[in-house]
Image (spheres, grey):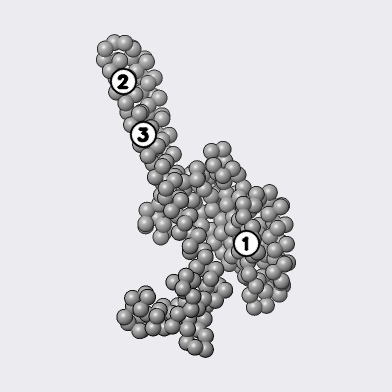
Amino acid sequence: MLNEKGNLSYTDLKSNVEITNNGLLNFHLKALDDLLVKDNSGQYGLTDRGRLAAKLLSESSEQEIVLQNRRKGWKRLLLVVIASNFSALIVLLSLTYFGIIDSTGMLRGMFGFSTSTVCLYLFYTMIRPATINQAHGAQVRTIQDIFVSERHLQEVHEEVQRWVNDEGITIEEQRDGFVRGRLGTPSGLVTTPKYFEVTYKPERNGVIVHTEGWISIFGASEKSFSKTALVSAGSARKNGWIVMEHLWQRLKTLSR
């Protein structure tokens, strides 16, 4: 709200968020202390960090809508394929019943049907959206904040660029204090792409660096990196963590 409307008084905030309890509103304002600033006239506004947080929330919401639409598209496609599979099974049984194909042909067809059904199920488990409990119980992305002390923004920027070049990361978006890149092809049809986002801004006596890393399976599902390889998208998760860990080590070494 503050990002859209600008500075607001305490009364305006209370009215807009429809909170009648002063204690409750004060509790939330205190919780957001490092994102808000109060000027001499008593109006609340956003700090630089607050504006960055609002921007990240907005971008995250837009990305989630895109992901949800992709998931729905993949789910419809899977349902169509499964329905076609069952139709083929019915045709196979009918041909066997009328003696058009023998038992050997039927067994081969049944084996093909079973194999394709299992593959379809495994594929769906990879791209299906997480349930609410899974989303709250697992990290959606690998996130870490690292403070680089006694360094200027340009020094951190140059170190991040060296990391990008050394790891062979393809930059998708870059602006002041922000880099987004990936390893692998965006479609995920050949390799599972690994995505990285690095945001850095001046902080007192140094620079604060915010890092995120995740993989995208067929552009429909996002999974966080892991230190260990898992059955689902195994090595991509492990290798993604290693690449991100290299950046963390660089930043900690850079810090004085």
Identify the disc placed on residue 133: none
Q: For residue 189, say whether it is visible.
A: yes
Callout 1, which amino acid?
Answer: Phe
Q: Check disc 1 and report the residue beneath it.
A: 178
Q: Check disc 3 and report the residue beneath it.
A: 80
Please indicate whether residue 184 sits to the left or right of residue 230 in the image: right
Residue 201 point in image, percent of width and height: 63, 70
Q: Is residue 44 above or below residue 117?
A: below
The residue at 39%/37% (across/down) is 78
Please indicate whether residue 70 sits to the left or right of residue 227 in the image: left
Residue 177 point in image, percent of width and height: 64, 65
Q: Are marks 1 and 3 in contact (CB under 8 Å)?
A: no
In this view, the residue in front, 222 or 73, is 73
Mark-to-mark CA distance, 1 and 3? 41 Å
Residue 70 point in image, percent of width and height: 44, 45
Quadrant location of the N terminus in the rendered image: bottom left
Identify the disc placed on residue 91: 2
In this view, the residue in front, 59 or 84, is 59
Q: Is residue 42 above or below residue 114?
A: below
Q: Secondary structure at mark 2?
A: helix
Q: Is residue 123 above or below residue 205?
A: above
Mark-to-mark CA distance, 2 and 3? 17 Å
The residue at 52%/76% (across/down) is 46
- Compare marks 1 and 3 and give the one earlier in the sequence: 3
Number of residues whose C-alpha sits closer than 10 Å to that of mark 3, classed few (under 14), some (14–19) or many (20 or more): few
